[in-house]
Amino acid sequence: METITITLNGREVSGHPGMTVLELADESGVNIPTLCNDSHLAPFGACRICLVEDERSGALMASCVTPIASGMVINTESARVLERRKIIVKLMLASHPDSCLVCDKGNRCELRRIASESGIGLVEFQKIPQPSLIKEVNPFLERDLSKCILCAKCIRADHELVVEGVIDYIRRGFTSRPATLNDSALEKSDCTFCGTCVAFCPTGALMEKERPYAGTTNRTVTTICPFCGCGCGISLEVKDNTIVRCRPDKDSPVNRGTLCVRGSYGYDFVHSSERLTQPLIKVNGDFKGSSWEEAWDLVATELGRIREADGPESLAVLGSPKCTNEENYLLQRFARCVLGTNNVDNSSRLYSAASRKGLGWNLGLPGTTGSLENLEQSDAILVVGADPTSSAPLVGYAIKRAVRYRGAKLLLVDPRRTKLTAFAHLWLKPKVSTDVALLNGLARLIITESLLDEEFVTRRTDNFEAFRQGLETYTLELAEEITGVSSQELRSAAQIFAAANQASIVFGKGVTQHITGTDGVMALANLAMLTGNVGHGSGGIYALQGDSNGQGACDMGVLPSFLPGYQFVDDPQTLKRFADLWGKCDPTGAGLTALEMIEQAREGRIKAMYVVGENPAASFPHLALVREALASLHFLVVQDMFLTETARLATVVLPAASFAEKEGTFTNFEGRVQRLHKVIDPVGQSLPDWGIILQLAKRMGYPMPYSSLEHIMDEIEELVPFYQGTGYTDSEMKGIYRAEFGNPPPGARRLYKGQFPSGFGRFSPVHYVPNRELSKDGYPLTLITGTSLYQFGSGSRTSRASRLNRFLPEAPVDISNIDASHLEINEGDRVKIVSPSGQISAKARITDTVTEGMLFMPIAFPESPVNALFDIDLDPQSKTPSLKACSVRLERIDSHE
Amino acid sequence: MNEKNTKCDLTLVDQIIEHYRARKWPLIPILQEIQNESGFIPPEAIEPIARALNMFPSQIQGVITFYSQLYTEPRGKRIVRVCRGTACHVRGGKTILKLAKQHLGIEEGQTTLDMEYTLETVACIGVCAMAPNMVIGKQTYGHLNPKKVSQIFGDSTNARG
């Protein structure tokens, strides 16, 4: 590659064309101060602090926007440079308040640091009066623009990284400053409070508003965000044993300097006063605190007794996609070796089982096939049944960046208007639950118009003929009739998707949480294979994960039909391998899935359950029935951070440590294995889940031979081929991003060069089945559920995160103008939503995001558990319950009642 | 300047966007055309412009507020610009401005309630020989004195009816 050599402070250094002087200096170890430059943002040249002198011409140039040119003689610390820089900083200080002593930015302020490094004392310039604090009522961030130095980092982070476009400069000259549209308060704008601008702001102009804990931090620990499956790196700043602040980890290849509101402001559940600090044992209906010894002994004795009396099949274990890989691995070993049952599942069953099943069958790989970076490089992106801007914000950012800055075409399939709609090239609004018909229609058109990738189909896949025949009935006319999407739009979507060099598919719960979820996923996989968009270049399938370790919990075999690494429980050779390693592995045949456990508990066949880090009494469908089933158990052990709805039904509650209090690994939705680091000591007597499980195993007569987490990961690497090279090879456990993502070792889970694990991808003919649940007499409206930015999971953590909870404490139900006026409902009215399975109340929000006959409600609000409205209807293939759409009616609750 | 609408006509905005959007750098021409047609750029126009040009509304606002000749509020049918340049100043421009304020009953930068006049000042209009000066619409008035100012506004007031 061509190189350009310049002289930098008397030394010859070389860089590649296009590099700026600042970049080359950085690379050569020469420090040039700057306030407006950041490696995640395009160079801007606003602050002029990074001045350097070209010794040949004597010109002073901003090094961040000056490309290197052959023969340049650059001096970064000539007398002229230092003098001018000093003046620029002084001018900034002249319009900056002298409040450093009480400014919370304190020693983190970059302006103050540069002023100090430039040797500036008192500023002789006349002070320029500055605007005062902007009044905001949001609990997340505040703007004190008297401290703004107009570096535009906030604006650029907003536009270039988060692509929300909420702020830009307003006016010019002395009155210029960053402002929202109409200069309104942030909470009245489209701001999502992701906190990215706060992290980028070099001064105290943008700050966290309500800080649960104040003070100068003395430590920063980098770990992984505990909420969604994106797996962002976060830097937690700690004072003593308290987390004071959360910032994005700038080195994380996942979030690259950004975060979302949950990541930035949701961590404080860790310090909630409701954290469990000691084991609880229920005596005569009331919980009494106990010692660990007592609790462990009771659990071991009871589980042992029930196993003896009713057999291991009367026991069930529910693991958590919020626990680490190591913990999940231990938990399934506990279930299989200690309890002797395959009745072990995790609650990602609620959203990702269909994608595991569908993708596993078609591609031989139960998960996402590419990385976020690749997604961003796609030419066309098909998003089906997902609102990543809320459920997986980093995926949302990547899609928006691809559209706005790389010209990618977004094909959005969603009956509801979301933030992505504004970015869509084509927005298809199919009737709810008609995805399979829509996707089959697209596939058929691609075949009949010869838009398919014939080489890929011929060389890499099989079963094409059966698939093609199965599509014959799905003419555009039929697809239009079923989905309500015009054949013209369908045609243009098919053409764009097929024509794209690299086309990606992103899907979420809108596909998987239907009783035909697996079919929907297979239809998507078919479409990807048909157009040759699996594993080569950028094209790929992105299955969003609801939880931080949804992928890992399944990879670790917390599944009733799979041992770690998706190895079948009924394969004798596999069983023998595991039995040899573990000493024993008795259970044979697939166990019960999560919802089947509940059903069998209700029927009395499951007698005892061990629930780790999961809250089925709030997150499963048909809550009344789930609670009844859990309450009817002879023995229920719940291991959690809080006394959740589920824990209240337990006999023994074991206090678990939070993500910030333990080590381990999470696997994000891309399949990237990332390290968690211990930030603070466990709260009270709580213990990490892995420690609790090890103790229980020991007391039940099967001590597991692990001396450390490293030891556990070594075993995982041995058993799970695609986890090789992800372990704690670094003795200091520093390298947080262990998985060599761009260049995986053999056996890794990426589909390299389209090479499928079994050699061939397999087309699966799938057929549209009408959803009869959506047309019940007396329930005229269709309710769609989804994720809100401000509550998450079952709400047990976010409802205890003070700022998130205060910003949006109550679930709104979105209703169209037409339905609202028809039902005489006004904005803000309390309404009752009734389905055949239950009823909840919520506050009406009249909006154009939903159409006539459609309602929308976010999940995870503890006061309005929308799952209560669903019956337990399982997708027969994946056993995922339908949780996405149901028919309801709406009743006004009159205020005088 | 011709008589302008003071209300926002979004179909007009859409037509203007359609006319210019295929051009290179269409934002400024669109804003100017909307202002030519409506007399100002209604805030409601920002959203459709942003959508059409794949920009953020905040960016459009940034451009509008950057240029002093783009307005976001309705303006009078006639713009009164009193010269505050040096030559006019020494010949009593300050008094002319005071009189104009009195006659119109508004401050600098404001518009009369009947939407007839907007009062502005200008640094120099380039006819210093005729100082003190004032421009109303496209008509320049020079060699001003209090009587003349009264006549000008009196006439206009009469003309208004």
Image (tube, coloured by chain):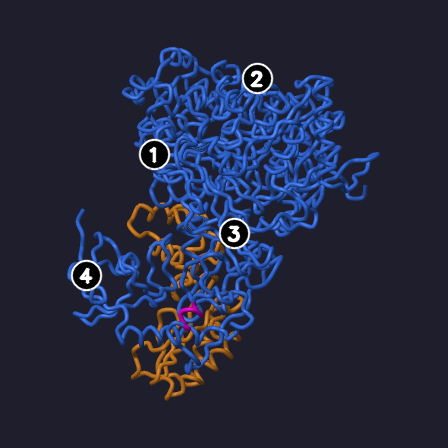
Per the rendered image, the range of residues in magenta is A111-116
Tell me if residue A454 comes above or below residue A785 in the rendering: above
Residue A770 among those drawn in magenta: no
Q: Amino acid at mark 3?
A: Cys
**Who comes first in sequence, dot 1 or dot 4?**
4
Neighbourhood count class around disc 4 (C-alpha, 10 Å): few under 14, some 14–19, many 20 upward = few
Tell me if residue A138 comes above or below residue B103 in the rendering: above
Q: Are marks 4 and 2 on the same chain?
A: yes
SS for dot 1? loop
**Who comes first in sequence, dot 4 or dot 2?**
4
Q: Are marks 1 and 4 on the same chain?
A: yes
Q: Which residue is mark 1?
A: A538
Q: Which residue is mark 4?
A: A12
Q: Colour of chain A?
A: blue
Horizontal side, residue A807 vs residue B156: left or right:
right
Distance, label 1 to label 3, CA atoms, is 30 Å
Q: Look at the image and tell me whether residue B13 can be seen.
A: no
Magenta-drawn stretch, dominant element (helix, strand or loop)? helix
Q: Amino acid at mark 1?
A: Ser
Q: What chain letter is assigned to the residue under label 4? A: A
Neighbourhood count class around disc 2 (C-alpha, 10 Å): few under 14, some 14–19, many 20 upward = some
Distance, label 3 to label 4, CA atoms, is 47 Å
Neighbourhood count class around disc 3 (C-alpha, 10 Å): few under 14, some 14–19, many 20 upward = some
Q: Quadrant of the C terminus of chain A?
A: top right
Q: Which numbered tag is attached to residue A590? A: 2
SS for dot 2? loop
Q: Colour of chain B?
A: orange
Q: Nearer the viewer, mark 1 or mark 3?
A: 1
Observer-nearest of A750 and B61: A750
